[in-house]
Image (cartoon, rainbow, N blue to C red):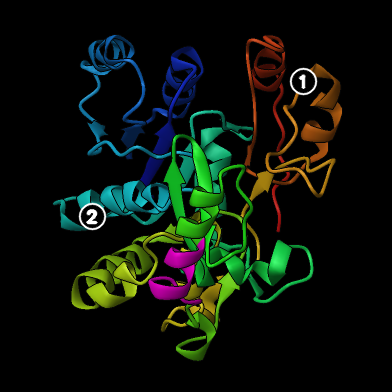
Amino acid sequence: MKIAYIILAHKYPKTLLRLIYKLNTDDVSFFIHIDKKTDSQIVGQLVNQLQDLPNVSFIKRYNSAWGSFDIVKATLEGIKLIAEGSTYFDYIVNLSGQDYLIKSNEQIKKFFEENKGREFLEYFPLPCSKWKGGGLRRVEYWHILWKNEYFSLPEKREFKSPISSLFYSFLNSVFFKKRKFNKIFPLYGGSQFWCLTGECAKWIHDFINQNPQFFNSFNYTFCTDEIFFQTLILNSPFKEKVVNEHLRYIDWDNIDAYHPRILTRNDFEKIKQSEKLFARKFDLTIDQDILDLIDQNNIDTISV
């Protein structure tokens, strides 16, 4: 059972290194993306510390700001390296640098062996009630990041300056019209995190190469990492093999929040009882003990 981990990280190098060392076993490889904004000195330190691991590769770096389509681009770069490489992987798992395994490597491999051929991906059809605008505004509007702020066109917006307001209205009326994605193919949303078979990842790579218009249609969208792969796979030959499950323990204590709650030692008992394979998210500047507790724990039961 060969597993490839695509890990997207932008801070907390110690946490990233700990994740890699903990996952590092025979028949495992890592494809690491470090956000383009990350300080070059930190990147250099990571490269130096991982240079003795021949199973670690670094992905072309993107400015993967939260909500940006570059997150999808970075993930696809990892899939490209895997699909075009000489090693076949049974499963590809995407993680963030603030994720951690809550089962042993042996249990993770056993789980994938017992479920070989299944695609693990959370999904629900769009529009849905839990996302603003049913989720369609994420792709129908043109989302432009300017000075760390997203502008959504043709959404109406007021400015202090009358000239700015007039110019904005002009752009809306002349250049930006709402796009109708759901008229082309059914849209699906869900968590950005998944566990896909090597066959499915290869199909994604080939499809994107053969259908660049599909890829390009998602430019200037928002939080598309929670739509792109769901829409692609649920309209693919792999649809019937999808299990509606991302295999992560995540605590969305506030359903309206943009990010899940940081897990601490107070969450350990719930994590211990979880049947998931991984958990997120962790911040060792807030709690340094939780990962030690997870490492010390050994859970034998896994089921979905």
Q: Residue at x 55, y 58 (%)?
A: 226
x then y, percent, for residue 38: 36, 21
In the image, residue 176 lies in the stretch drawn in magenta: yes
Q: Position of residue 61 (x, y in %)?
A: 27, 36
Q: Quadrant of residue 114?
A: bottom right
Disc 2 marks a residue whose amino acid type is: Lys
Residue 232 relative to residue 101: left or right: left
Q: Is residue 17 above or below residue 147?
A: above
x, y percent for residue 10: 43, 27
Along the line of sight, the residue nearer the viewer: 174 or 9: 174
Image point (64%, 67%), residue name: 135
Q: Is residue 118 visible?
A: no
Mark 2 element type: helix
| Numbered circle sitting on residue 264 | 1
Classified by dominant secondary structure, the portion drawn in magenta counts as: helix
Splitting the image into 4 quarters, where does residue 26 fall?
top left
Q: Residue at x 68, y 16 (%)?
A: 296
Q: Position of residue 57 (x, y in %)?
A: 23, 33
* Vertical comparison of 217 with 304: above or below: below
Question: Which sits in the foreground, 10 or 108?
Answer: 10
- Give the amino acid type for the residue marked by disc 1 in the picture: Thr
Q: Which residues are magenta?
A: 169-178
Task: Evaluate if marks 2 and 1 touch, with contact meaning CB atoms under 8 Å apart.
Answer: no
Q: Which residue is mark 2?
A: 80
- Residue drawn 45% across the image and 57% down it: 167
